[in-house]
Image: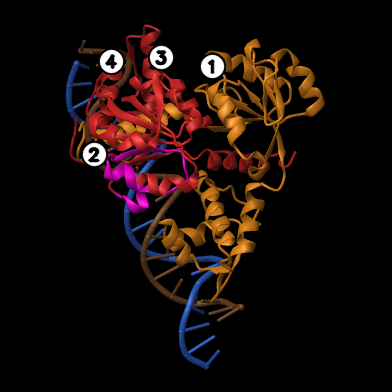
Chain colours: A red, B orange, C brown, D blue
Amino acid sequence: MKENKEISASVVGRLPRYYRFLCELSAAGEVRISSRELSERMGLTASQIRQDFNCFGGFGQQGYGYNVEQLKNEMAAILGLDVLTPAILMGAGNLGRAVASQMRFEEMGFSLVGIFDTDPAYRGMKLRGLQIQSNEKLADFCLKKRPRMAILCVPQDKAPALVDELILLGLDSFWNFSHYDIRAKYPQANVTNVHLSDSLMTLSYSIKNSQNGGK
Amino acid sequence: MKENKEISASVVGRLPRYYRFLCELSAAGEVRISSRELSERMGLTASQIRQDFNCFGGFGQQGYGYNVEQLKNEMAAILGLDVLTPAILMGAGNLGRAVASQMRFEEMGFSLVGIFDTDPAYRGMKLRGLQIQSNEKLADFCLKKRPRMAILCVPQDKAPALVDELILLGLDSFWNFSHYDIRAKYPQANVTNVHLSDSLMTLSYSIKNSQNGGK
DNA sequence: TAGATTGTTAATCGATTAACAATC
DNA sequence: TAGATTGTTAATCGATTAACAATC
């Protein structure tokens, strides 16, 4: 793997999709694939695919293409799926519970080790075999289990203080479902934002600006 | 509004965030804002902000800046939030229920008019005052209520056939939480994808490629 | 060897930033 | 009027695409 140059966000953003297609090809028993074939399946150019892969090294073979299994494994290693980062869920509301019960964390480079919510109504409830705990137990828990990543599913106004606390407790990575801008205050943190409402408004834009517009 | 040129996806992707900041400014009672001030708050360049706004028309005034209230309203109109598109939720699993109960559809240009799930276990359950219905009632429902958008929260393998059906029933827009590539088959559909697992893998990448790497 | 397809360099395209004249 | 800030054009930067020599 070429460790020198920084990989652009555009390239990184395409990696999970490459990985997904390679998993499907692998599951379907395909042994080799050319950049042209892959480009047709994925709706990209073959050039882009080769450029993207070559950010990380030459995984192909001239005249042959790429070995599906090998490329899939390379991709998993690049994405860091082979090392599990311990993660906690903060906020066990509708969205938090959906995320906790639905995501296959272990296949995505994480293991969910704790779930916290301030609301006593959830106390005792279990998700994925994990009991929902009070935030009062957070500090102790972090000392013992050393989670590194937090999934932020708390209400907007609770996010800033909570992030401050989590940073103090040694976490440095966030999967952020709130609109709080973590990177503004902690530029060194690893942050991936999921802004569902932004995504929905984007759809509104494209509907109202399509041929049929308002209908 | 300049109706001529197509607006790039990069610009459209920034509109909801502009709108969000303008709502906050408005709520805080701010009357005017300059592109420089806004750029500092948002972490963008003033140039970019002015370029973005001017895709849609000149909303500012030289020497003064922008009127917060007016700009907010313009933004809402551009995003099409003032017209509600009727939408249905397909799939009332964890994620579907979270989305249905959490999103403020009416503030984002949509109204949720129906919820459907094949699983009889959900029959009778209510979300936002809407009863979860059997898919058998879908065709009749669409004839009556004419939903235009569907939120796809169904398992991977159910998506292709379901989209075929929804297209036949007159829907042309999708908020897609599955990995099924709707646009490949229906290039004219309005589609916004939410790929939670891709998002999570992206975070894994940035963690494992940060200074501390694997830890 | 001949054919295929990569890895990589060069060309193009688009998006972002800088600069500044227009003007409130 | 003088100062501020837009709208817009030009310059820069980065990402995508095309081309092709290297090579399996």
Which residue is the site of mark 4? A64
Q: Residue at x 48, y 48 (%)?
A: A157
Specify whether residue A47 is in view.
no
Numbered label attached to residue A201: none
> Residue A93: horizontal and vertical position, in percent?
51, 32
Label 2 – label 3 distance at C-alpha: 29 Å
Q: Which amino acid type corresponds to the residue marked 4 in the rendered image?
A: Tyr
Label 4 – label 2 distance at C-alpha: 34 Å
Q: Chain of mark 2?
A: B
Which residue is the site of mark 1? B155
Q: Which amino acid type corresponds to the residue marked 1 in the rendered image?
A: Pro
Label 1 – label 2 distance at C-alpha: 33 Å
Q: Which amino acid type corresponds to the residue marked 3 in the rendered image?
A: Glu
Q: Chain of mark 3?
A: A
Where is A158 relative to A67, above or below? below
Specify whether residue A28 is in view.
yes
Q: Residue at x 47, y 42 (%)?
A: A178
Task: Please check the rendered image and state whether residue A102 is part of the magenta-colored stretch, yes or no.
Answer: no
Which residue is the site of mark 3? A24
Question: Which residue range is magenta in the image?
Answer: A164-187
Mark 4: give few (<14), some (14-19) or many (20+) Cα within 10 Å: few
Q: Nearer the viewer, mark 3 or mark 4?
A: 3
